[in-house]
Image (cartoon, grey):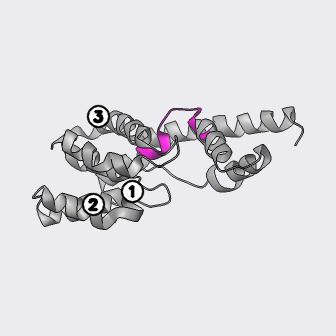
Amino acid sequence: MDIQKLEKFVKPFYINEDMMHDFSHVLRIIKAAKMLTKRYRSKVEPDLIAFGSYFHGMIFQHEAEIAEFLKSLHLPEEKAHLVIKISWESLKEKVPETLEGKIVHDANLIEGGKTFIIVKSLITGSLKGQTLEETIGYLENSIIGKFSCYLPQSQEIYAKKETFAKNFLVQLKKDIAL
């Protein structure tokens, strides 16, 4: 796989995204996916995980362009279809079927470590013009407890992440008297 060619293709799609969903988001997913992949090294195709990570944030709007790009790489049709499938499986609301999809999906949820649900939500809420109270409500009603990881090691990491977020929100609401 030619990573430079892949990055040259995907980077323009991330330029206008907010700072939590730009190309740095892809790099955080790749970092988490590499950590998760260690346990499954002999059972996965690293290229599929890389493609799924790079296409994660653009699959829902640019599937046709991704398919054309994969065709330009002379990827076998079956493998190209699998890349598309894994890219879709990476979305947090999806239930992945493939091992590579589970890795990229879970990497998306555990990216950035224990504090990242809070950081990402506060920044994204601010960028959307939400009040602090609206962002707290969004976290409580739409994020915490709404998604699942599918690999044992990521389930443990995500549980710690959610526990931290719940405790943080309890303290924050106390401190600002909500």
Q: Quadrant of residue 26?
A: top left
Disc number placed over residue 66 in the picture, else none: 2
Between the C-alphas of marks 1 and 3, the distance is: 26 Å
**Which residue corresponds to the image point at 56% horizontal and 32% vertical from the top-left?**
114
Residue 44 showing in the rendered view: no
Q: Residues within 10 Å of mark 2 (few under 14, many from 20)?
A: many
Residues at circles 2 and 1 in contact by the CB criterion of under 8 Å:
yes
Could you tell me residue 34's position as x and y percent?
32, 35
Could you tell me residue 60's position as x and y percent?
41, 63
Q: Residues within 10 Å of mark 3 (few under 14, many from 20)?
A: few
Between the C-alphas of marks 3 and 2, the distance is: 27 Å
**Which residue corresponds to the image point at 85% horizontal and 32% vertical from the top-left?**
175
Going from the N terminus, do you reach mark 2 or mark 1 first?
A: 1
- In magenta, the rendered stretch is 107-117
Going from the N terminus, do you reach mark 3 or mark 2 first?
A: 3
- Give the position of the N terminus as an image quadrant: top left
